[in-house]
Amino acid sequence: MELIMPGLGVIFWMTLAFAIVVYILRRYAWKPILNTIKDREDNIRRSLKRSEKIEKEIKELKETKERIVSETNHEKVNIIEQAKKARDEILKEAREKAIEESKKIIEESKKIIEVERKKAEAQIKKEIAVLSIDMAEKILVSELSDKQRHKQLVLDSLEKISLN
């Protein structure tokens, strides 16, 4: 029965040992343990606040990214439309210039052709005149070999000149 009902001396010594252990723990161990636990809680609290802040920043960054992507897509569409308009305008101007240039070239070609035609006509007239003179000379030489005929031809020519 002694185990179930310890003696008064054992209770005293056990209580004294417990009090000493509690005093030693309280004096040397509880404060560092409680400070460590408090530091740990503070660190966890700061980490939670930091993670909430980071989550907010991530959410804001996602929204900003979506907004920037949307604006970029809108600008891209605008740039493409402007480029198409500029291309069409450049093509239109190029066509107009090409038409003007072709008209100028055609006009210049017509002028050149006309000048060349006139030169050719003048050259042909000269050649015809030279040939006519050569032929007339040959005819006259053959016709005028006879003196009588020669006189008659000169008289006919004088009559025609005086009639005119």
Image (cartoon, rainbow, N blue to C red):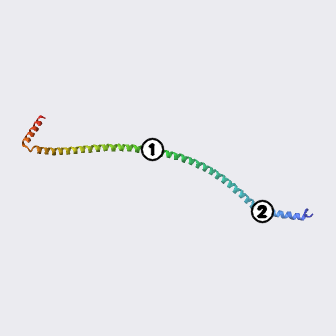
* Residue at left offset 47%, top offset 45%: 84
Q: Quadrant of residue 113 in the image?
A: top left
Q: What crowding class fits label 2: few (fewer than 14 Cα within 10 Å), some (14-19), or many (20 or more)?
A: few
* Residue at left offset 37%, top offset 43%: 99
- Quadrant of the snapshot with the N terminus: bottom right
Q: Is residue 112 left or right of residue 69?
A: left
Disc with the residue nearer the chain's start (1 vs 2)? 2
Q: Is residue 30 left or right of residue 61?
A: right
Toward the top, the furthest residue is: 163
Considering the numbered disc 2 on the image, is that residue within a helix, a strand or a loop? helix
- Quadrant of the snapshot with the C terminus: top left
| Residue type indicated by callout 2 | Arg
* Residue at left offset 80%, top offset 62%: 23
Q: Which residue is mark 2?
A: 27
| Residue type indicated by callout 1 | Asp
Q: Which mark is residue 123?
A: none
Measured as percent of width and height from the top left, residue 49 is found at 67, 53
Considering the numbered disc 1 on the image, is that residue within a helix, a strand or a loop? helix
Q: Nearer the viewer, residue 76 or 30?
A: 76
* Residue at left offset 40%, top offset 44%: 95
Q: Is residue 2 left or right of residue 154?
A: right
Q: Which mark is residue 88?
A: 1
